[in-house]
C-alpha cells in the first residue's frame, strides 16, 4: 500500500488508521445587557415575558422551554423543575423578587397548561369582491372631486365628501380585518419545535434585533450562552454556571459555553 501511495496509484493507505477530525471552533454569540432589555420591553405579553426571562437569565434549552408547564413552578420552594434532553431533569432556583412570580399570578392558568401552547392560525374569508370594487371606485371619484374644489367650496360639499370618505374607509377596514390571521391556542398541548423557532424570531424582530421576516442568524441557543456567561461574570464561579446550565461536568461549561474575560 505504501508503494502504491508513493507512485500515486492510491490516494492513501487503506490500512492506516483514520485520523480524528479536528473539532470546529465554537462561535459564542451572546446578547448585551441593552439587547436583553430591549427584547423584554418589546414583548410585554406575560407568557412571552416568562419564556424570554427563562431563556436569557436561566439558560433553558428550546426543548426544555417547550415542555414547561405551570405545575413545574413551585412558589413555596421558589424553584423551577426543568426537564431537559436525555430524560434528565434538574431544579433551578427562582428568587422571590423575580418578576416571573408576578407574571404567573397574572396568567392564573391551571397547572397542566403549557407556558407556550400550540397555536392554530386560520385566515378569515375575504368579503365580496363587488363590495371591494365599489369602495375603490368611490375613493377614486372622491380624489378627482377633491382636485376640482377651490377655496370657495361650500362647507356642505366638504361635509358630504368627509362622509363619503368615512364610508369608503369603513369598507376598506372590512377588507383588512377579513385578511387578518386569527389564532386560537390549545393550552393543553405544547408548542412545536418549528413554531418555537418562529416565535423566537418574532420576539427579536419586535425588539429590532433582527429584521422582520428573518428566521436565521440569531439562534435561540444564543440566549443560553448569554445566561450562562452572565452567571460566570457575576459570580466568578464556574460551578455555579454549570449548575444553572444543568451540566454534569464543569469542563462542558468552561469549554463550550463560557470564556474568561
Image (spheres, rainbow, N blue to C red):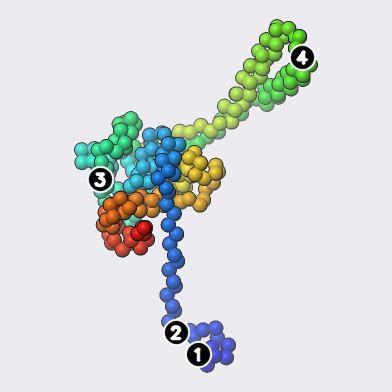
Q: Which residue is mark 1?
A: 1
131 w.r.t. 52: above or below: above
Side of 103 relative to 182 (left or right): left
Between residues 61 and 126, which one lies in front from this camera angle?
Answer: 61
In primary-sequence order, the first of circles 1 and 4 is 1
Residue for point 25% across, 43% down: 79
Q: Which residue is mark 2?
A: 16
Camera-near label (4 vs 3) is 4
Q: Secondary structure at mark 2?
A: loop
Q: Position of residue 259 (x, y in %)?
A: 36, 59
Q: Residues within 10 Å of mark 1 (few under 14, many from 20)?
A: few
124 w.r.t. 171: above or below: below
- On residue 253, the disc is none
Q: Which residue is mark 3?
A: 93
Q: Which residue is mark 4?
A: 149
Residue at the farthest front position: 261
Residue for point 41% across, 33% down: 45
Side of 74 relative to 16 (left or right): left
Compute the Cα span from label 2 to label 3: 52 Å
Camera-near label (2 vs 3) is 3
In primary-sequence order, the first of circles 4 and 3 is 3
Q: Secondary structure at mark 4?
A: loop
In primary-sequence order, the first of circles 1 and 2 is 1
**Quadrant (top left, top right, bottom left, bottom right) of the C terminus:** bottom left
In primary-sequence order, the first of circles 2 and 4 is 2
Between residues 202 and 17, which one lies in front from this camera angle?
Answer: 202
Q: Position of residue 134 (x, y in %)?
A: 71, 21
Q: Position of residue 188 (x, y in %)?
A: 36, 38
Compute the Cα span from label 4 to label 3: 70 Å
Side of 153 relative to 95 (left or right): right
Amino acid at each position: 500500500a505504501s508503494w502504491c501511495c508513493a507512485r500515486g496509484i492510491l490516494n492513501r493507505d487503506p490500512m492506516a488508521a483514520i485520523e480524528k477530525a479536528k473539532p470546529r471552533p465554537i462561535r459564542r454569540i451572546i446578547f448585551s445587557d441593552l439587547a436583553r432589555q430591549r427584547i423584554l420591553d418589546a414583548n410585554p405579553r406575560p407568557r412571552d415575558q416568562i419564556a424570554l426571562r427563562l431563556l436569557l437569565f436561566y439558560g433553558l434549552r428550546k426543548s426544555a422551554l417547550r415542555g414547561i408547564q405551570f405545575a413545574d413552578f413551585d412558589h413555596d420552594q421558589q424553584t423551577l423543575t426543568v426537564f431537559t434532553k436525555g430524560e434528565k431533569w434538574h431544579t433551578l432556583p427562582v428568587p422571590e423578587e423575580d418578576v416571573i412570580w408576578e407574571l404567573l399570578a397574572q396568567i392564573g392558568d391551571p397547572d397542566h397548561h403549557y407556558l407556550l401552547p400550540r397555536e392554530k392560525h386560520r385566515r378569515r374569508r375575504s368579503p365580496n369582491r363587488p363590495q371591494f370594487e365599489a369602495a375603490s371606485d368611490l375613493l377614486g371619484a372622491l380624489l378627482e372631486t377633491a382636485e376640482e374644489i377651490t377655496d370657495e367650496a361650500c362647507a356642505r360639499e366638504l361635509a358630504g365628501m368627509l362622509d363619503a370618505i368615512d364610508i369608503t374607509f369603513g369598507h376598506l377596514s372590512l377588507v383588512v380585518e377579513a385578511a387578518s390571521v386569527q389564532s386560537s391556542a390549545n393550552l393543553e398541548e405544547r408548542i412545536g419545535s418549528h413554531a418555537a423557532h418562529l416565535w423566537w424570531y418574532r420576539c427579536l424582530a419586535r425588539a429590532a434585533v433582527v429584521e422582520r421576516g428573518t428566521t436565521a442568524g440569531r439562534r435561540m441557543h444564543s440566549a443560553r450562552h448569554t445566561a450562562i456567561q452572565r452567571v460566570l461574570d457575576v459570580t466568578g464561579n464556574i460551578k455555579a454556571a454549570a449548575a444553572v446550565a444543568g451540566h454534569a461536568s464543569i469542563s462542558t461549561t468552561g469549554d463550550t459555553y463560557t470564556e474568561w474575560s
